[in-house]
Image (cartoon, rainbow, N blue to C red):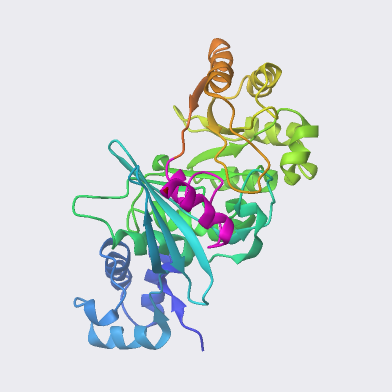
């Protein structure tokens, strides 16, 4: 019989488990504090639980977080973690420092099946979905490696995979992360990024998990988006933007549109003008992401002048637009560069090590 991974469960689920095992509900709260608050993985270390309860837990459950297989440090302070799952599959997570923030980029799938042409992860295909425990377990595992005084302040679902294609596990992980008895993160400090799965956006809106939503747009016409992002053949720009307009944004919260700038592909003045028209009326900001190169992609990063001109065009039309220079590029950890430990990924690291 397979054991229950307690990292899959919310604090309320842990209360229900305690009751099922013949203990009062508050034992579940104590269990949650050990697992989420202190990062404990062994039941014999949970000294305020009864010996009988610990023995029952050891028979039926475990606390199984991914194992840290390797850590690659970047010159800019970022760290790329290669994490090994219980079945031997591997994923990557990235820790990104920025002033007083320390952001952890979480993966939700082993690989990705959406094949966005500018993304290395999309060349791998998807092997399987992660469980809720494997998603939150990335935080559990990486917290144990932090230096003195470090604390993960923000979480972004922007690693390997499409979060809304693994909707149930993503939603459960968000409940665990935001529960005050769980990891206790404010929803405002968590961002979920999607390629534009309209059905998933609608589910997220219905559940009112109130996290930040980031939409990977990257093109302003259906023709180009079809070419760059095959998902657009299922949900066209009109459908996606209609779902964005229906999305219930909390007060003082904005949606983010992510736009990877590709030289001579989507960085023209008319692209900027169309982008303004597409998102007009949505309380939003735009993250412009200069393309992060990887061998074999066939794309180039625009010149600094071209990037600045694109941003200026948005700003002049009242659109909040920032240029997001991705960190970790020298270790293959920047936006669009995550992938398996392949010769392609290794080439990126070696190029910057020279």
Can residue 209 be seen in the rendering of this structure? yes
Q: Residue drawn 60% across and 54% down?
A: 121
Residue 52 position within the rendered picture, expressed as x and y whole percent measured from the top left:
27, 88
Residue 296 position within the rendered picture, expressed as x and y whole percent measured from the top left:
66, 48
Of the pair 129 and 94, the residue shown nearer to us: 94
Can residue 49 be seen in the rendering of this structure? no
- Note whether 251 is above or below 87 in the view shown: above
Residue 255 position within the rendered picture, expressed as x and y whole percent measured from the top left:
54, 32
> How many marks overall?
0
Q: Residue drawn 46% across and 30% down?
A: 253
Residue 195 position within the rendered picture, expressed as x and y whole percent measured from the top left:
64, 44
Magenta stretch in the rendered image: 327-353
- Note whether 7 is above or below 23 in the view shown: above
- Note whether 237 is above or below 201 in the view shown: above
Q: Is residue 119 left or right of residue 142?
A: right
Q: Is residue 277 left or right of residue 187?
A: right
Of the pair 7 and 250, the residue shown nearer to us: 7
Q: Is residue 180 left or right of residue 215?
A: left
**In the figure, residue 51 lies in which quadrant?**
bottom left
């Amino acid at each position: 019989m397979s054991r229950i991974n307690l990292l899959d469960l919310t604090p309320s689920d842990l209360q229900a488990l305690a009751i099922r095992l013949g203990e009062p509900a508050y034992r579940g709260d104590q269990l949650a504090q050990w697992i989420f608050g202190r990062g404990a993985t062994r039941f014999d270390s949970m000294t305020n639980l009864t010996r009988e309860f610990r023995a029952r837990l050891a028979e039926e459950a475990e606390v199984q977080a991914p194992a840290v297989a390797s850590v690659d440090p970047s010159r800019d302070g970022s760290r790329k973690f290669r994490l090994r799952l219980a079945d031997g599959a591997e994923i990557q997570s990235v820790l990104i420092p920025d002033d007083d923030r320390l952001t952890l980029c979480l993966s939700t799938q082993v690989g990705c099946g959406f094949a966005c042409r500018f993304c290395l992860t999309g060349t791998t295909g998807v092997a399987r979905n992660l469980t809720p425990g494997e998603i939150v377990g990335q935080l559990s595992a990486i917290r144990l490696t932090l230096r003195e005084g470090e604390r993960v302040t923000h979480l972004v679902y922007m690693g390997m995979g499409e979060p809304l294609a693994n909707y149930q596990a993503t939603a459960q992980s968000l409940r665990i992360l935001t529960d005050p008895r769980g990891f206790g993160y404010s929803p405002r400090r968590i961002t979920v990024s999607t390629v534009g799965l309209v059905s998933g956006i609608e589910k997220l809106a219905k559940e009112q998990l109130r996290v930040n939503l980031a939409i990977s747009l990257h093109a302003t016409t259906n023709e180009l988006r079809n070419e760059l992002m095959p998902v657009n053949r299922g949900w066209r720009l009109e459908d996606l933007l209609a779902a964005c307009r229906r999305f219930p944004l909390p007060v003082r919260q904005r949606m983010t549109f992510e736009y990877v700038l590709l030289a001579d592909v989507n960085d023209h003045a008319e692209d900027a003008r169309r982008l303004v028209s597409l998102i007009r009326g949505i309380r939003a900001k735009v993250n412009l992401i200069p393309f992060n190169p990887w061998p074999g992609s066939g794309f180039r990063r625009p010149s600094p002048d071209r990037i600045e001109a694109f941003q200026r065009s948005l700003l002049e039309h009242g659109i909040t637009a920032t240029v997001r220079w991705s960190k970790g590029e020298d270790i293959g950890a920047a936006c669009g560069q995550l992938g398996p430990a392949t010769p392609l990924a290794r080439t990126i690291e070696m190029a910057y090590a020279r």
